[in-house]
Image: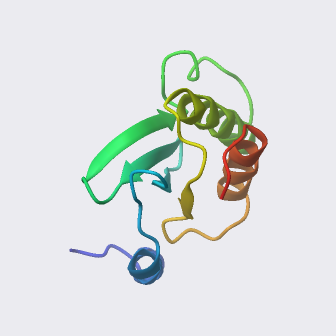
Amino acid sequence: MAIKSRKEFRRFRIKKRIRKIVQGTPDRPRMTVFRSNKAIYVQLIDDMAGKTLVAASSMEKGMDGQKGTKTEMAKMVGKHIAEKALQAGINNVVFDRNGYLYHGRVKSLADAAREGGLKF
């Protein structure tokens, strides 16, 4: 994999270290976060089957028309993923911050998902 910058390489190393420990199962999927400059994406993944069970992002229909800061959008996505997960019968997840520091958008998404009813 071609690494573009030192910052990206650092995140990649942290991501590999986290993924050695965090594993998603059918009853407790891995909740992984990806944040770009414009949007934030979250997926619930069953690593045993290699399938995405539920996904949400700030770019989905209905969400992209919303106004607010990126942190507020992350909160909305966190609540949205919690609703979708509960409808799919998923209560417990393992949180994978994907190499990002646990503050700002990542933290607000996780807190909103907890408020929405997910346990991790």
- Tally of numbered discs: 0
Q: Is residue 27 above or below residue 10?
A: above
Q: Position of residue 110 (x, y in %)?
A: 68, 52
| Residue drawn at the location 44% of the way across and 84% of the way down | 17
Q: Is residue 8 above or below residue 105?
A: below
Q: Relative to residue 106, is residue 33 drawn left or right?
A: left
Who is closer to the viewer here, 43 or 104? 43
Residue 108 in the image: state x and y as whole percent.
Answer: 74, 50
Quarter of the picture containing the C terminus is bottom right
Q: How is the image coloured?
A: rainbow
Give the residue displayed 25% in from the left and 53% down from the top: 50
Depth check, front residue: 109 or 2: 109
Residue 115 left/right relative to 57? right
Residue sitting at the far left: 1
Instruction: Pick the residue in front: 33 or 68.
Output: 33
Residue positioned 46% across, 72% down in the render: 22
Nearer to the camera, 78 or 74: 78
Q: Is residue 95 left or right of residue 29?
A: right
Is the N terminus in the top left, top right, bottom left or bottom right quadrant? bottom left
Q: Position of residue 80 (x, y in %)?
A: 62, 30
Give the left or right position of residue 44, taking residue 81 as reference: left
Establish if 22 lies above or below 69.
below
Rendering coords of residue 104 (x, y %): 73, 58
Determine the image quadrant of residue 21: bottom left
Q: Who's the residue at 49% across and 43% down the image?
A: 41
